[in-house]
Image (cartoon, helix red, strand yellow):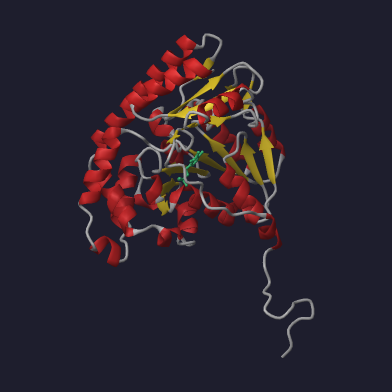
Amino acid sequence: MTAPAARRRGEFPTRPEVHAAHWRPRGDHRHVLNLKSCEMQHPAADRLVTEVLSGLTAREVRGYPYHLGLMERLAEIGGTAVDDVLLTAGSCGAIALVVDGYAQPAGRLLAQEPVFDSWLHYAALRGVPVTRCAGLAGSPPEPVTDELVAAMRTGPPAVVAITDPGNPAGLVLPVPRIAELAEVAAEHGHLLVVDECYGAFTGTDHVPLVGRFPNVLVLRSLSKSWALAGARLAAVFGPAPVIDYLRRFRTDSAVSAPAVALATGIAARLPELRGIWRDVTALRDGFATRVLADHPGWTALRPGGNFVTFATGVPGGGHAVERALAARGIRVRGLDDVAGLAGCVRLSLADRDRMAGVADVLRDVA
Ligand SMILES: Cc1ncc(COP(=O)(O)O)c(C=O)c1O
Protein backbone atom coordinates (compact mmCIF):
# COMPACT_ATOMS: atom_id res chain seq x y z
CA MET A 1 0.00 0.00 0.00
CA THR A 2 1.27 3.47 -0.79
CA ALA A 3 0.58 6.66 1.11
CA PRO A 4 -1.58 9.32 -0.60
CA ALA A 5 0.65 11.38 -2.86
CA ALA A 6 -0.22 14.65 -1.11
CA ARG A 7 1.04 13.36 2.19
CA ARG A 8 4.71 13.12 2.91
CA ARG A 9 6.09 10.18 4.87
CA GLY A 10 5.28 10.52 8.61
CA GLU A 11 2.75 13.31 8.11
CA PHE A 12 -0.77 12.78 9.40
CA PRO A 13 -4.01 14.48 8.46
CA THR A 14 -4.81 17.41 10.76
CA ARG A 15 -7.55 20.00 11.19
CA PRO A 16 -6.44 23.04 9.20
CA GLU A 17 -8.00 25.51 11.69
CA VAL A 18 -5.79 24.24 14.49
CA HIS A 19 -2.64 25.43 12.76
CA ALA A 20 -3.86 29.00 13.06
CA ALA A 21 -4.29 28.63 16.84
CA HIS A 22 -1.60 29.16 19.46
CA TRP A 23 -0.53 27.64 22.74
CA ARG A 24 1.75 29.08 25.33
CA PRO A 25 2.18 28.17 28.98
CA ARG A 26 0.31 30.31 31.47
CA GLY A 27 2.60 33.14 32.60
CA ASP A 28 3.89 32.66 36.13
CA HIS A 29 3.09 35.83 38.10
CA ARG A 30 3.57 34.49 41.61
CA HIS A 31 6.33 37.00 42.30
CA VAL A 32 4.01 40.02 41.95
CA LEU A 33 0.70 40.99 43.52
CA ASN A 34 -1.51 39.48 40.84
CA LEU A 35 -4.81 41.37 40.68
CA LYS A 36 -5.39 40.40 37.06
CA SER A 37 -6.49 36.76 37.18
CA CYS A 38 -9.45 37.24 39.57
CA GLU A 39 -8.43 34.26 41.68
CA MET A 40 -9.95 34.21 45.16
CA GLN A 41 -7.34 35.78 47.44
CA HIS A 42 -8.97 35.82 50.85
CA PRO A 43 -7.40 34.64 54.12
CA ALA A 44 -10.54 32.78 55.24
CA ALA A 45 -10.75 31.01 51.86
CA ASP A 46 -7.10 30.01 52.20
CA ARG A 47 -7.82 28.60 55.68
CA LEU A 48 -10.90 26.75 54.46
CA VAL A 49 -9.12 25.18 51.47
CA THR A 50 -6.05 24.31 53.60
CA GLU A 51 -8.22 22.55 56.18
CA VAL A 52 -10.11 20.60 53.53
CA LEU A 53 -6.83 19.72 51.78
CA SER A 54 -5.42 18.35 55.02
CA GLY A 55 -8.19 15.73 55.00
CA LEU A 56 -7.14 14.30 51.63
CA THR A 57 -5.25 11.02 51.60
CA ALA A 58 -3.30 8.92 49.11
CA ARG A 59 -6.60 7.22 48.21
CA GLU A 60 -7.69 10.39 46.41
CA VAL A 61 -4.65 10.14 44.19
CA ARG A 62 -4.14 6.44 43.65
CA GLY A 63 -7.81 5.69 43.06
CA TYR A 64 -10.14 6.74 40.25
CA PRO A 65 -12.60 9.52 41.05
CA TYR A 66 -16.28 9.00 41.95
CA HIS A 67 -18.23 11.94 40.67
CA LEU A 68 -21.83 11.15 41.53
CA GLY A 69 -21.79 12.30 45.18
CA LEU A 70 -20.46 15.73 44.20
CA MET A 71 -22.93 15.99 41.30
CA GLU A 72 -25.76 15.27 43.74
CA ARG A 73 -24.49 17.89 46.16
CA LEU A 74 -24.05 20.54 43.45
CA ALA A 75 -27.54 19.75 42.15
CA GLU A 76 -28.90 20.18 45.67
CA ILE A 77 -27.10 23.53 46.05
CA GLY A 78 -28.40 24.63 42.65
CA GLY A 79 -31.94 23.46 43.46
CA THR A 80 -32.03 21.07 40.49
CA ALA A 81 -32.09 17.32 39.92
CA VAL A 82 -28.81 15.46 39.47
CA ASP A 83 -29.85 14.75 35.88
CA ASP A 84 -29.47 18.48 35.26
CA VAL A 85 -25.77 18.71 36.12
CA LEU A 86 -22.46 17.59 34.69
CA LEU A 87 -18.87 18.24 35.69
CA THR A 88 -16.05 19.62 33.58
CA ALA A 89 -12.41 20.47 34.22
CA GLY A 90 -13.11 24.20 34.62
CA SER A 91 -15.55 26.21 32.56
CA CYS A 92 -13.03 26.33 29.74
CA GLY A 93 -13.67 22.58 29.48
CA ALA A 94 -17.39 23.32 29.48
CA ILE A 95 -17.04 25.86 26.70
CA ALA A 96 -15.04 23.42 24.57
CA LEU A 97 -17.77 20.85 25.20
CA VAL A 98 -20.60 23.19 24.15
CA VAL A 99 -18.71 24.20 21.03
CA ASP A 100 -18.15 20.53 20.13
CA GLY A 101 -21.63 19.37 21.04
CA TYR A 102 -23.77 22.23 19.81
CA ALA A 103 -21.98 25.14 18.12
CA GLN A 104 -20.18 23.02 15.57
CA PRO A 105 -23.28 21.15 14.41
CA ALA A 106 -25.23 24.45 14.31
CA GLY A 107 -22.32 26.04 12.45
CA ARG A 108 -22.74 29.31 14.31
CA LEU A 109 -21.93 31.03 17.59
CA LEU A 110 -23.49 34.32 18.64
CA ALA A 111 -21.60 35.97 21.47
CA GLN A 112 -22.27 39.01 23.59
CA GLU A 113 -19.26 41.36 23.87
CA PRO A 114 -16.94 41.33 25.70
CA VAL A 115 -16.56 37.68 24.69
CA PHE A 116 -14.61 35.40 27.04
CA ASP A 117 -11.54 34.29 25.13
CA SER A 118 -12.24 30.54 25.45
CA TRP A 119 -15.33 30.87 23.23
CA LEU A 120 -13.27 32.45 20.48
CA HIS A 121 -10.47 29.94 20.86
CA TYR A 122 -12.58 26.77 20.77
CA ALA A 123 -14.83 28.14 18.03
CA ALA A 124 -11.74 28.88 15.92
CA LEU A 125 -10.38 25.38 16.54
CA ARG A 126 -13.63 23.88 15.24
CA GLY A 127 -13.98 26.35 12.38
CA VAL A 128 -17.20 27.82 13.83
CA PRO A 129 -17.84 31.44 12.77
CA VAL A 130 -18.60 33.81 15.63
CA THR A 131 -20.97 36.76 15.38
CA ARG A 132 -20.03 39.23 18.10
CA CYS A 133 -22.81 41.52 19.34
CA ALA A 134 -22.32 44.74 21.29
CA GLY A 135 -22.89 44.09 24.98
CA LEU A 136 -22.00 47.50 26.40
CA ALA A 137 -22.96 51.01 25.40
CA GLY A 138 -22.48 54.50 26.78
CA SER A 139 -19.98 56.17 29.00
CA PRO A 140 -19.77 54.92 31.66
CA PRO A 141 -20.90 51.71 29.97
CA GLU A 142 -24.18 49.94 30.65
CA PRO A 143 -25.10 46.42 29.50
CA VAL A 144 -27.23 46.24 26.35
CA THR A 145 -28.81 43.30 24.54
CA ASP A 146 -30.62 44.81 21.52
CA GLU A 147 -28.02 43.69 18.98
CA LEU A 148 -27.96 40.18 20.40
CA VAL A 149 -31.76 39.97 20.39
CA ALA A 150 -31.90 41.23 16.78
CA ALA A 151 -29.32 38.61 15.75
CA MET A 152 -31.32 35.90 17.51
CA ARG A 153 -34.55 37.00 15.83
CA THR A 154 -33.10 37.10 12.33
CA GLY A 155 -30.46 34.35 12.21
CA PRO A 156 -30.65 30.56 12.00
CA PRO A 157 -30.30 28.45 15.19
CA ALA A 158 -27.02 29.03 17.00
CA VAL A 159 -25.34 28.75 20.35
CA VAL A 160 -25.71 32.12 22.09
CA ALA A 161 -23.05 32.89 24.71
CA ILE A 162 -23.39 35.53 27.38
CA THR A 163 -21.42 36.22 30.57
CA ASP A 164 -23.37 37.54 33.53
CA PRO A 165 -22.16 39.15 35.73
CA GLY A 166 -20.14 40.52 32.85
CA ASN A 167 -16.43 40.19 32.84
CA PRO A 168 -14.38 42.38 32.76
CA ALA A 169 -17.04 45.08 33.28
CA GLY A 170 -18.64 43.59 36.41
CA LEU A 171 -22.10 44.78 35.32
CA VAL A 172 -25.17 42.61 35.84
CA LEU A 173 -28.28 42.16 33.73
CA PRO A 174 -31.34 41.52 35.92
CA VAL A 175 -32.39 37.85 35.77
CA PRO A 176 -35.75 38.81 34.11
CA ARG A 177 -33.72 40.32 31.23
CA ILE A 178 -31.82 37.05 30.88
CA ALA A 179 -35.16 35.22 31.01
CA GLU A 180 -36.33 37.40 28.08
CA LEU A 181 -33.22 36.34 26.15
CA ALA A 182 -34.05 32.71 26.98
CA GLU A 183 -37.57 33.24 25.63
CA VAL A 184 -36.31 34.69 22.34
CA ALA A 185 -33.77 31.88 22.14
CA ALA A 186 -36.52 29.29 22.64
CA GLU A 187 -38.73 30.92 20.00
CA HIS A 188 -35.95 30.89 17.41
CA GLY A 189 -34.29 27.56 18.20
CA HIS A 190 -31.11 28.84 19.88
CA LEU A 191 -29.27 27.39 22.86
CA LEU A 192 -28.55 30.18 25.38
CA VAL A 193 -25.43 29.61 27.49
CA VAL A 194 -25.00 31.84 30.54
CA ASP A 195 -21.54 31.91 32.11
CA GLU A 196 -22.04 33.00 35.72
CA CYS A 197 -18.45 32.57 36.85
CA TYR A 198 -18.71 35.64 39.14
CA GLY A 199 -22.34 35.23 40.20
CA ALA A 200 -21.47 34.33 43.81
CA PHE A 201 -20.13 37.86 44.34
CA THR A 202 -23.31 39.57 43.12
CA GLY A 203 -25.90 37.07 44.37
CA THR A 204 -26.77 36.23 40.75
CA ASP A 205 -28.27 32.78 40.17
CA HIS A 206 -29.40 31.70 36.70
CA VAL A 207 -29.87 28.01 37.49
CA PRO A 208 -33.65 28.42 38.10
CA LEU A 209 -33.94 29.32 34.38
CA VAL A 210 -32.91 25.74 33.58
CA GLY A 211 -36.24 24.52 34.99
CA ARG A 212 -38.20 27.08 32.95
CA PHE A 213 -36.59 26.82 29.52
CA PRO A 214 -35.62 23.75 27.46
CA ASN A 215 -32.67 25.57 25.88
CA VAL A 216 -30.66 27.23 28.66
CA LEU A 217 -27.29 26.09 29.98
CA VAL A 218 -25.60 27.71 32.97
CA LEU A 219 -21.84 27.44 33.48
CA ARG A 220 -20.83 27.72 37.12
CA SER A 221 -17.07 27.70 37.53
CA LEU A 222 -15.72 26.80 40.97
CA SER A 223 -12.43 28.54 40.09
CA LYS A 224 -13.08 31.91 41.69
CA SER A 225 -16.04 31.48 44.00
CA TRP A 226 -14.83 28.25 45.63
CA ALA A 227 -11.14 29.27 45.53
CA LEU A 228 -10.40 26.25 43.33
CA ALA A 229 -8.88 27.72 40.16
CA GLY A 230 -5.96 25.31 40.38
CA ALA A 231 -8.21 22.29 40.87
CA ARG A 232 -9.95 22.91 37.49
CA LEU A 233 -13.60 22.26 38.21
CA ALA A 234 -16.92 23.61 36.96
CA ALA A 235 -20.54 22.54 36.96
CA VAL A 236 -22.81 22.82 33.93
CA PHE A 237 -26.54 23.04 34.67
CA GLY A 238 -29.09 22.39 31.97
CA PRO A 239 -32.31 20.55 31.12
CA ALA A 240 -31.85 16.78 31.46
CA PRO A 241 -31.99 15.96 27.70
CA VAL A 242 -29.30 18.56 26.94
CA ILE A 243 -27.12 17.35 29.82
CA ASP A 244 -27.68 13.72 28.84
CA TYR A 245 -26.40 14.50 25.33
CA LEU A 246 -23.38 16.44 26.64
CA ARG A 247 -22.48 13.80 29.25
CA ARG A 248 -21.70 11.41 26.42
CA PHE A 249 -18.57 13.46 25.69
CA ARG A 250 -17.40 12.20 29.12
CA THR A 251 -15.82 15.45 30.28
CA ASP A 252 -15.92 14.07 33.82
CA SER A 253 -13.06 11.75 32.92
CA ALA A 254 -10.82 14.87 33.13
CA VAL A 255 -12.16 15.78 36.60
CA SER A 256 -9.71 14.45 39.17
CA ALA A 257 -10.42 12.75 42.49
CA PRO A 258 -8.52 15.45 44.46
CA ALA A 259 -10.71 18.10 42.78
CA VAL A 260 -13.83 16.11 43.67
CA ALA A 261 -12.66 15.65 47.27
CA LEU A 262 -11.85 19.35 47.63
CA ALA A 263 -15.18 20.51 46.26
CA THR A 264 -17.04 17.94 48.37
CA GLY A 265 -15.20 19.14 51.50
CA ILE A 266 -15.94 22.78 50.74
CA ALA A 267 -19.58 22.00 49.91
CA ALA A 268 -19.91 20.63 53.43
CA ARG A 269 -18.94 24.07 54.75
CA LEU A 270 -21.12 26.19 52.49
CA PRO A 271 -22.24 28.69 55.17
CA GLU A 272 -18.55 29.58 55.72
CA LEU A 273 -18.04 29.98 51.99
CA ARG A 274 -21.10 32.22 51.74
CA GLY A 275 -19.68 34.35 54.56
CA ILE A 276 -16.47 34.72 52.54
CA TRP A 277 -18.47 35.85 49.50
CA ARG A 278 -20.18 38.48 51.66
CA ASP A 279 -16.83 39.65 52.96
CA VAL A 280 -15.38 39.85 49.44
CA THR A 281 -18.28 42.06 48.36
CA ALA A 282 -17.83 44.29 51.43
CA LEU A 283 -14.10 44.54 50.71
CA ARG A 284 -14.81 45.32 47.06
CA ASP A 285 -17.30 48.06 47.89
CA GLY A 286 -14.98 49.59 50.51
CA PHE A 287 -12.04 49.54 48.10
CA ALA A 288 -14.12 51.16 45.34
CA THR A 289 -15.33 53.89 47.68
CA ARG A 290 -11.81 54.63 48.88
CA VAL A 291 -10.38 54.79 45.33
CA LEU A 292 -13.21 57.01 44.11
CA ALA A 293 -12.58 59.41 46.99
CA ASP A 294 -9.01 59.78 45.72
CA HIS A 295 -10.10 59.96 42.05
CA PRO A 296 -13.29 62.03 41.85
CA GLY A 297 -13.21 61.90 38.03
CA TRP A 298 -13.41 58.09 37.98
CA THR A 299 -16.51 55.88 38.07
CA ALA A 300 -16.76 52.33 39.43
CA LEU A 301 -18.82 49.98 37.28
CA ARG A 302 -21.15 48.44 39.87
CA PRO A 303 -21.50 45.95 41.31
CA GLY A 304 -18.33 44.21 40.04
CA GLY A 305 -17.40 40.61 40.77
CA ASN A 306 -14.49 39.71 43.02
CA PHE A 307 -12.99 42.68 41.23
CA VAL A 308 -13.66 46.37 40.66
CA THR A 309 -13.62 47.94 37.20
CA PHE A 310 -12.99 51.66 37.14
CA ALA A 311 -13.75 53.98 34.22
CA THR A 312 -11.03 56.66 34.30
CA GLY A 313 -12.78 58.76 31.65
CA VAL A 314 -9.42 59.22 29.90
CA PRO A 315 -8.62 57.55 26.56
CA GLY A 316 -5.78 55.11 27.22
CA GLY A 317 -6.31 55.59 30.96
CA GLY A 318 -6.73 51.87 31.63
CA HIS A 319 -3.36 50.91 30.19
CA ALA A 320 -1.72 53.92 31.86
CA VAL A 321 -2.88 52.67 35.28
CA GLU A 322 -1.82 49.13 34.34
CA ARG A 323 1.70 50.34 33.52
CA ALA A 324 2.00 52.55 36.59
CA LEU A 325 0.99 49.71 38.92
CA ALA A 326 3.16 47.16 37.08
CA ALA A 327 6.17 49.35 37.84
CA ARG A 328 5.32 48.81 41.53
CA GLY A 329 4.85 45.05 41.31
CA ILE A 330 1.05 45.08 41.02
CA ARG A 331 -0.53 43.30 38.06
CA VAL A 332 -3.94 44.57 36.87
CA ARG A 333 -5.76 44.65 33.54
CA GLY A 334 -6.12 47.83 31.49
CA LEU A 335 -9.16 47.45 29.26
CA ASP A 336 -8.64 50.06 26.55
CA ASP A 337 -8.62 47.34 23.89
CA VAL A 338 -11.87 45.72 25.06
CA ALA A 339 -15.05 46.66 23.17
CA GLY A 340 -17.01 49.23 25.18
CA LEU A 341 -14.39 49.57 27.93
CA ALA A 342 -11.88 52.12 26.60
CA GLY A 343 -10.35 54.05 29.50
CA CYS A 344 -11.25 51.32 32.02
CA VAL A 345 -9.07 49.24 34.31
CA ARG A 346 -9.98 46.13 36.31
CA LEU A 347 -8.45 45.21 39.65
CA SER A 348 -9.31 41.95 41.35
CA LEU A 349 -9.13 41.73 45.12
CA ALA A 350 -6.68 40.46 47.69
CA ASP A 351 -6.94 40.85 51.48
CA ARG A 352 -7.80 44.17 53.16
CA ASP A 353 -4.25 45.20 54.04
CA ARG A 354 -3.00 44.60 50.53
CA MET A 355 -5.94 46.46 49.00
CA ALA A 356 -5.35 49.43 51.32
CA GLY A 357 -1.75 49.43 50.03
CA VAL A 358 -2.97 49.24 46.42
CA ALA A 359 -5.31 52.20 47.02
CA ASP A 360 -2.35 54.20 48.42
CA VAL A 361 -0.25 53.38 45.36
CA LEU A 362 -3.14 54.29 43.05
CA ARG A 363 -3.56 57.63 44.83
CA ASP A 364 0.12 58.37 44.27
CA VAL A 365 0.54 57.20 40.68
CA ALA A 366 -2.74 57.74 38.85
C1 LIG B 1 -15.97 34.89 32.06
C2 LIG B 1 -15.19 33.78 32.67
N1 LIG B 1 -15.71 32.56 32.66
C3 LIG B 1 -15.05 31.54 33.23
C4 LIG B 1 -13.82 31.73 33.83
C5 LIG B 1 -13.18 30.62 34.58
O1 LIG B 1 -12.76 29.63 33.79
P1 LIG B 1 -12.31 28.27 34.47
O2 LIG B 1 -13.53 27.70 35.15
O3 LIG B 1 -11.87 27.44 33.31
O4 LIG B 1 -11.22 28.57 35.43
C6 LIG B 1 -13.22 32.97 33.80
C7 LIG B 1 -11.88 33.15 34.34
O5 LIG B 1 -11.09 33.96 33.98
C8 LIG B 1 -13.93 34.02 33.24
O6 LIG B 1 -13.44 35.25 33.26
In the image, taking residue 236 as reference, residue 185 lies left or right, namely right
Vertical arrangement, residue 282 with respect to residue 227, above or below: above
**Residue 323 at x, y = what percent?**
57, 28
Vertical arrangement, residue 110 with respect to residue 252, above or below: above
In the image, taking residue 240 as reference, residue 77 lies left or right, namely left
In the image, taking residue 224 as reference, residue 310 lies left or right, namely right
Q: Nearer the viewer, residue 84 or 119?
A: 119
From where the camera sits, is residue 79 visible?
no
**Residue 174 at x, y = what percent?**
49, 25
Image quadrant in which the N terminus is located:
bottom right
Please identify the residue farthest to the bottom as the structure is shown: 1
Vertical arrangement, residue 131 with respect to residue 5, above or below: above
From where the camera sits, is residue 240 visible?
yes
**Residue 123 at x, y = what percent?**
63, 51
Please identify the residue farthest to the front as the structure is shown: 327
> Which residue is depicted at the point 33% across and 52% down?
71
Vertical arrangement, residue 280 with respect to residue 265, above or below: above
Image quadrant in which the C terminus is located:
top right
**Residue 148 at x, y = what percent?**
65, 33
Please identify the residue farthest to the right as the structure is shown: 5
> Which residue is depicted at the point 69% across and 36% down?
151
The count of marks equals 0
Quarter location, residue 272: top left
> Which residue is depicted at the point 47% across and 62% down?
248
> Which residue is depicted at the point 43% across and 53% down?
89
